[in-house]
Amino acid sequence: MTSTREVTRSLAARDQLLPVPAGEVTLRDEAAKTERTVAVAAFELGAYPVTRERYAAVTGQEPAGPGGPGTPVTEVSWPDALRHCNLLSQALGLRPCYLLGDDPDARDTRWDREADGFRLPTEAEWEYACRAGSPDVRYGPLDEVAHHRGNSGGRPHPAGTRRPNAFGLYDMLGNVWEWCWDLYDPEVYGPYRVFRGGGWQDEPRGVRAACRRKSHPTLRIDDLGFRLARSL
């Protein structure tokens, strides 16, 4: 485990969290053809997805997967992402947000909403932060803001090499998908969790602010990572 000073220095660089103002977002389920408007309190979100280098610095482990140290970490399950959040919180003297249990479906995982540590964004927070006030499907021209199947060369790219959105957040679209806290639809899909944003292998339709995907929390794949959030 790295020292608090080393982790703090790491956060000051590529793991910087930026303020996201309060607002509201309309979430649309394109398959079910439903929508709901959700109020979002002010919070902080990572300017970049967690990179392989940062993940290894905090956990002492570097998962398998493509890309160099500056590319977003992949091959991480939903519980892996939560453990990273807890370890980083503990390293910086913050109260961890998550209590992880032994259920293979992660149904016994609990979020302490009073904790001041790091966490995953909710789905509503993620989409609100991704849009950054834009009503369009993307916050800019596709090739300018995202690495996708048409321009990625079949591989992930270092975080922050495409144009950020109006909140200063990079790679909210493309490069890698990002785990969110939420269950997708527990009545239909049980423990499946949401991930958002599209990845380097995806066609343009998958690289949109409103696009939702899901899988079992144990999924590890080469185009799925996460980014840090923190409550204010």
Image (spheres, rainbow, N blue to C red):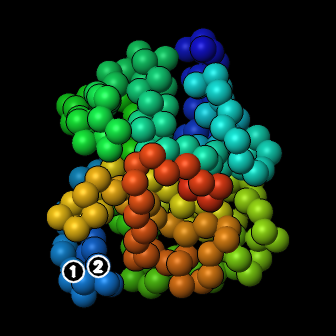
- Residue drawn 25% across the image and 58% down it: 190
Figure quadrant of residue 69:
top right
Near mark 2 (Cα within 10 A), the count class, few <14, some 14-19 or many ≥20, is few
- The correct choice, above or below, for 187 with respect to 84 in the image is below
Residue 130, which numbered label? none
Q: Pick whichever, 220 or 66, lies toward us.
A: 220
Read off the residue under disc 2.
29
- The correct choice, above or below, for 22 with respect to 138 in the image is above
Near mark 1 (Cα within 10 A), the count class, few <14, some 14-19 or many ≥20, is few
**Distance between the alpha carbons at the discs numbered 2 and 1:** 6 Å
- The correct choice, above or below, for 202 with respect to 67 in the image is below
**Residue 213 appears anywhere in the view:** yes
**Residue 46 appears anywhere in the view:** no
* Secondary structure found at label 1: strand
Instruction: State yes or no: discs 2 and 1 in contact (Cβ < 8 Å).
Output: yes
Read off the residue under disc 1.
35
